Amino acid sequence: MAISIKKPHEIEKLSISNNIVAKTLNYLSKQVRPGISLKEINALGEEFIHSHGGRPAFKGLYGFPAGVCTSVNEVIIHGIPDDYILKEGDILGMDIGVEKDGWYGDAAVTVGVGEITEANKDLIACSYDALMYAIEHITEGMRFKELSLLLEEFILARGYIPLRSFCGHGIGRKPHEEPEIPNYLEGNNPKQGPKIKNGMVFCIEPMICQKSGKAKILNDKWSVVSEDGLFGSHYEHTVAVINGKAVILSQD
């Protein structure tokens, strides 16, 4: 399948959906505290999205039961909101999708609950910094494999490992479109595969492990952890390539 090129008015539509995502994540990040449950966070997120004219895009997507992915501690992505009550020192990943007028937005953050360790601050910083580094270095004409290598080298240089088997992706009228964008180089040649072009819109989402990048899915069939069982982190933005550079759509 070809990677779609969005027209300026389509990117504007995507900006609206992604702005709701950004506002929701900013709002929820301020609600995160010891004593709040994951189900409460999800309910607040879904209500906020609806109040801004959007639809929680993840609810029912592939059978996922909620509007907010809530990934605690060793869960890196796809955590299901349940009755777990956050406690001091936890770290929480929140991943949100929004659909409005047939266009999708998607982004994620990882935040600390109360006071967290310096090690966990560094872990979270790696996913955020890798994301921003990649966005700053995107140029029209580079290959997606080069972007994947850029992410991998940054993560490894920080002493961490990218989660394997999961990746960033295109986005538009569907929540997941071509291409797939791993946070590591597949194969040996980054000069292969499709090139980044103006009008492309996609999600970059570094997923960070500590000792092993091998993914393991828990018994709930959704929550993804590293086989090392250690804490992980995740950040994500939706970007559009405009005038040769990546512009972040998922910010307030």
Image (tube, rainbow, N blue to C red):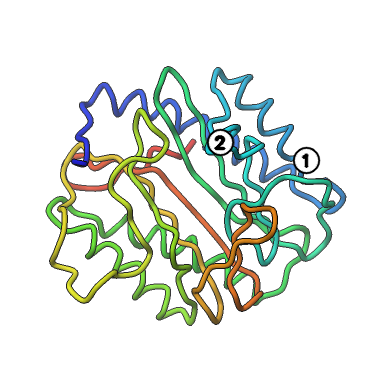
Residue closer to the observer: 191 or 159: 191
Element assignment for label 1: helix
Q: Residues within 10 Å of mark 2 (few under 14, many from 20)?
A: many
Given the image, on which type of amino acid does mark 2 rest? Phe
Which quarter shows the N terminus?
Answer: top left
| Residue shown at the point (59%, 37%) measured from the top left | 63
Q: Quadrant of residue 87?
A: bottom right
Residue closer to the observer: 103 or 150: 103
Is residue 16 found left or right of 232 in the rendered image?
A: left
Q: Quadrant of residue 30?
A: top right
Image position of 23 with respect to 188: above or below: above
Is residue 192 found left or right of 56 in the rendered image?
A: left
Disc on the earlier residue, 2 or 1: 1
Given the image, on which type of amino acid does mark 1 rest? Lys
Q: Position of residue 90 (x, y in %)?
A: 75, 63
Q: Residues within 10 Å of mark 1 (few under 14, many from 20)?
A: some
Q: Which residue is mark 1?
A: 39
Image position of 242 with respect to 166: above or below: above
| Residue shown at the point (47%, 51%) measured from the top left | 236
Is residue 241 found left or right of 215 in the rendered image?
A: left
Q: Position of residue 233 (x, y in %)?
A: 57, 63
| Residue shown at the point (78%, 40%) measured from the top left | 39
Q: Position of residue 195 (x, y in %)?
A: 15, 53
Is residue 106 found left or right of 218 in the rendered image?
A: left
Image position of 75 with respect to 68: above or below: below
- Mark sitting on residue 58: 2
Callout count: 2
| Residue shown at the point (67%, 67%) measured from the top left | 74
Element assignment for label 2: loop
Residue closer to the observer: 133 or 196: 196
